[in-house]
Image (spheres, helix red, strand yellow):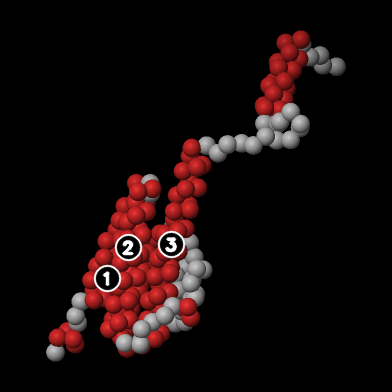
Amino acid sequence: MTTVGRRALLTAGAAGAAGAAVTLAGCASDGTEGPRKPTAAERAAAAEAALRSRSATTSRDLLVRYDAVIDGHPALAARLAPLRASVAAHVKALGEGGTAPAPGPSGPASPSPTRSLALVRVPADPAAALKDLAGAVRATADRHTAALLTAPPEYARLLASVAASGAVHAYLLTAPTEGDRA
C-alpha cells in the first residue's frame, strides 16, 4: 500500500483551492457568470472588422454601379472593364478575403448586400452615365479617405491607396477618349 505524505496533500489542496478561486472569480454572487469587459485588443479588432466591412461594402456598392452602367450601355463595357476589375480587387482587399467579387462584365452582375443592380439608375446618355459613375467613384474615394482617421496603420495605407485609385478612375471616366477628339 502507498502512503501519501503530508506535504503532497498540502500541495494538492493548495492547487485545488487556487483552481476553485479562479473558477469562482468569474462568477457573480447570484451564481451566474459576471460580464467580462473586452480587452483593448479585442475592442480594436472589433473596430477594425467593422471598418473593413463598411469599406468593402462601399466598394461593393461601387462595383454594382459599374455593372449597372455596363448593363445599360454595353458599348462602354470595353472602356469600363479594367476599372471595374480594379474595383473588384479593392472589394476583395478591403474585406481581407471576404466574399468574392461579382463576375466581370461578360458574366451576370451580382447584387450587393446594400444595393440591387435594378435599383441603380443609369442615365440614358452614355456621356451622362460616365459622368454619374465618376461622381460615385469620387464619393467612394471620399468615404475611404474619411475612414483613414480611424483605421489602424496597415489598413490606412490600403485605404489611402484605394482612395487614390478612385481619384484616378474618376479622372479617366471624365477625360475625353481618342474617339471623342476626332
Q: Residue shown at 23%/76% (left/top)? A: 174
How far apart marks 2 and 1 lie (CA) works out to 9 Å
Amino acid, disc 1: Ala
Compared to residue 70, the image places residue 58 above or below, namely above
Secondary structure state at the residue bearing disc 2 = helix
Compared to residue 151, the image places residue 112 above or below, namely below
Q: Residue 59's x, y, as percent?
A: 40, 66
Q: Residue furthest top?
A: 6
Q: Residue 171's x, y, as percent?
A: 23, 71
Amino acid, disc 3: Ala
How far apart marks 3 and 2 lie (CA) works out to 12 Å
| Circle 1 residue | 170
Q: Quadrant of residue 27?
A: top right
One can see residue 82 in this view: no
Q: Nearer the viewer, residue 163 or 108?
A: 163
Quadrant holding the N terminus:
top right
How far apart marks 1 and 3 lie (CA) works out to 19 Å
Q: Residue 72's x, y, as percent?
A: 39, 86
| Circle 2 residue | 141
